[in-house]
Amino acid sequence: MSQKRIRDYGLIVGRMETGRRNKITDVPGVLVGHSTIKNETNHTGVTVILPGRDNAFVKKYTAASYVHNGFGKSCGLIQIDELGMLESPIALTNTLNTGLVWDALTEYVIGQCQEENVTVRSFNPVVGECNDASINRIQNRAVNREHVLEAIRCAGEDFAEGDVGAGTGTICYGLKGGIGSASRVLEVEGKNYVIGVLVQSNFGATEDFVLDGRPVGVEILKKKEELEQMASSDLDQGSIMTILATDLPLSSRQLKRIIRRTGVGIARTGAYTGHGSGEVMIGFTTANRIPPAKEGEVVSQTILHEDKINPAFQAAAEAAHEAILNSMVCAGRTVGLEGQIYYSLAEFLPELLG
């Protein structure tokens, strides 16, 4: 994609090396697809993260989730926490479409299993959400089965960011939010591994926004005196979904420790995790796949030594931080349901970074 991202403005986040695309899909096998709805009443959509090209239900992924603040309506997290496994694509959408997307994912995986002669007696679809009701007429529940299937069909290694898919109607620090991604590379015993993050940003009070270590939120608020109908956010509310993928050999417990560090990246942008904001993290590794029980009653896994986990913590924090900024600069100016204007961070960057 030829979108202008935060590094194109000269702002380098963190110290670690990025992957080739600087996206979650730098993790080999991971794919991302969107379906976007933009019309007179609805600005919403769905984003799907495929952990690999094969059937996750048959050969599951070691996974973890963490709820930093639970103001949210996600599906599938209880079983991830209990079993430490992911058996589904991960879909992101708006709050009131969670159930419809869950249903579409279920239908998709049942169909996939039928083609492979795999019996499905139970299944754990994973769906995350943010509330986009300021820009999208959320009661219409505009995302349906076909949108989910479209997002899966178009999933690839390169994908758009900003106001697309599940980020079409989201807001971040009173500016336009959306989908953003970033990655970091770390070396273990002479081999390179990737940690990639994708966010659906929809949180933060404008006054709290920090950019390049500077509290620029107050400067942005001053623009309201000049820009008619410019929107802003008074409260830290609205939520952020954070998806982390890696090819590091990790246990579920280690993944939980790592995904918690994406909260450091969120905090670096200024948020304090307000009452009405749901900070939900989901992580998986493409290493340590879990085969069906019929292939053996004992599963062996290789895991990273705990004393060597710090670079993974740093990578998670840096990638989450940069992903949020990418979600904001890639998003275009959007008008809300009441005529308020949500500006893109990109419109203020020349002055803020000048």
Image (spheres, rainbow, N blue to C red):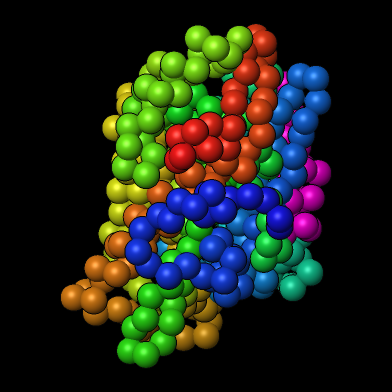
| Quarter residue 277 falls in | top left
Residue at screen point 32% across, 32% down: 215
| Left or right of residue 340, residue 182 in this image | left
Total numbered badges shown on the rendered structure: 0
- Residue 335 can be seen in this image: yes
Which image quarter holds the N terminus?
Answer: bottom right
- Residue at x 64% of width, y 21% of height: 135
Q: Residue at x 33, y 67 (%)?
A: 312
Give the answer, above or below, for where 95 lies relative to 188. Answer: above
Is 146 colored magenta in this rendering?
Answer: yes
- 26 vs 222, left or right, is right
- The stretch of residues the image draws in magenta is 139-155
Does residue 246 show up? no
Q: Residue 104, located in which quarter of the rendered image?
A: top right
Tell me what residue is drawn at x 59 percent, y 23 percent: 342
Query: Residue 112: image x %, image y %?
Result: 74, 64
Which residue is at the far bottom? 190
Along the line of sight, the residue nearer the viewer: 281 or 268 = 268
Q: Nearer the viewer, residue 108 or 321?
A: 321
Relative placement, left or right, of 27 versus 332 is left
Going by the image, does 290 lie left or right of 81?
right
Q: Position of residue 68 (x, y in %)?
A: 32, 41
Q: Position of residue 229 (x, y in %)?
A: 60, 10
**Residue projecting furthest to the front:** 354
Q: Main secondary structure of the magenta part?
A: helix
Query: Can you say whether 55 is above or below 353 in the image?
Result: below
Please determine whether, in this image, residue 176 is positioned above or below residue 104: above
**Is residue 262 within the magenta segment?**
no
In x, y percent, where is residue 250? 35, 73
